[in-house]
Amino acid sequence: MRIPVRCVCVLGLVATAIACGGGGGGSSSPTAPGNSGGAGTSSASSMTFRVDGTATTASSVTGNLANGILSVAGTDASRATTLSFGVTPTPTGTGTYTLGPLSSANALILIGNPAAGWQAAVGIGSGTITINTLTSTSASGTFSFSLAAVAGSGATGTKAITEGTFNVTFTGSGPPPGTPGNGSTISVLIDGVQWTSSLSRRATLLNNILTITGQDTNFRVITLAVPSSGGVHIPPSPPAIVSLDFATPGRGVVPMVLGAQNWDNGHDGGAGTFTVTSISSTRVTGTFTVTLVNNPINVTPVPTARLTNGQFDMALERF
């Protein structure tokens, strides 16, 4: 069964993965202060902001502090809007962090269904995140962003995020379901060299998009985002095959990030397949092979990367 999908965000998908509480998606980050923390959605958490002047209050808010990365996400279901951001705090924790060429911080907003995306990351968009308080159990602060449209997502122009506030409580003392400790694995050969998600990994199904994200101890992050109906179980349905070919309309999306280096399948030469061999209410397995090419946002172009013999066996979080 081959499933079409509208192209979704590239770097932004990475941001969303960590901001929803995975402890290891997102753009890569330098060595961070501490690896402890918790994650989850708490009724005590809140997020408010304006999108091009329109006030938005998130009804579902997630906060995460893991591997030195603070990630926050909020969703206003009534507006089909999800805003997420991630930042690596300094040892002092509090302060203002600027999104820009030398920062690993990132932000993403997804609007609509299918979602159009706008983002700020290395060399894209701008903004600031101010952390007023940061403990092992909570964080609060403010933010503002100028987000650029993600090519191929259906977005155009920019989005101004202003008057942003967040106050999140990290629930639990360890990683949430879908992260290390539940038997989840991702592995692949990158140009013939074995790679595994040795630091963290996560699988989520949100708005009929299946996202698989893994990160190693060198902070290389690989994300695969493909369509998957929430009502389909495999078996009894046959395996689902999704095209990752750049030339195929509605392809799946695969970004890979290592520091300031960015690869994806969203440009000429990107190609591959993603196969879901089984999916249940709580677990997903499959395989993938993909050729990733240089993303033009790189200051210095990177060579083509060939990912072969990719395999994943993941605990699945459904939202």
Image: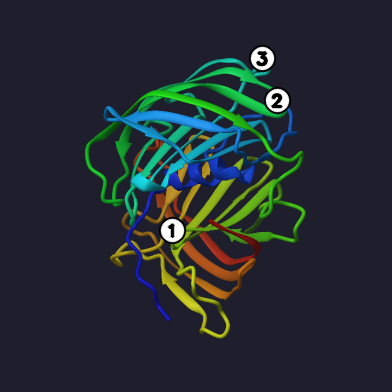
> With 305 as the anchor, is 195 left or right in this view?
right
Of the two numbered discs 2 and 3 on the same chain, state the one appearing first in sequence.
2
Q: Amino acid at mark 1?
A: Asn
Q: Position of residue 211 (x, y in %)?
A: 51, 57
Residue that badge 3 annotates: 92
Measured in 3D between alpha carbons, the distance from the residue under mark 2 to the one under mark 3, in whole angstroms, is 9 Å
Q: Amino acid at mark 2?
A: Pro
From this view, report whether residue 198 is shown above or below residue 57. below
Q: Which residue is more in the foreground, 133 or 91?
A: 133
Residue that badge 1 annotates: 207
Numbered disc 1: secondary structure: loop
From this view, report whether residue 191 is shown above or below residue 116. below
Measured in 3D between alpha carbons, the distance from the residue under mark 1 to the one under mark 2, in whole angstroms, is 33 Å
Q: Which residue is more in the foreground, 206 or 223?
A: 206
Residue that badge 2 annotates: 33
Q: Quadrant of the N terminus?
A: bottom left
> Which residue lies at the image location 75% right of the left edge and 33% below the top edge?
36
Q: Residues within 10 Å of mark 1 (few under 14, many from 20)?
A: some
Numbered disc 3: secondary structure: loop
Numbered disc 2: secondary structure: loop
Q: Position of residue 18 (x, y in %)?
A: 56, 42
Of the two numbered discs 1 and 3 on the same chain, state the one appearing first in sequence.
3
Q: Quadrant of residue 279?
A: bottom right
Callout 1–callout 2 Cβ contact below 8 Å: no
From this view, report whether residue 59 is shown above or below residue 310. above
Q: Position of residue 49 (x, y in %)?
A: 39, 28
Measured in 3D between alpha carbons, the distance from the residue under mark 1 to the one under mark 3, in whole angstroms, is 37 Å
Give the mark toward the camera: 1 or 3.
1
From this view, report whether residue 180 is shown above or below residue 205. above
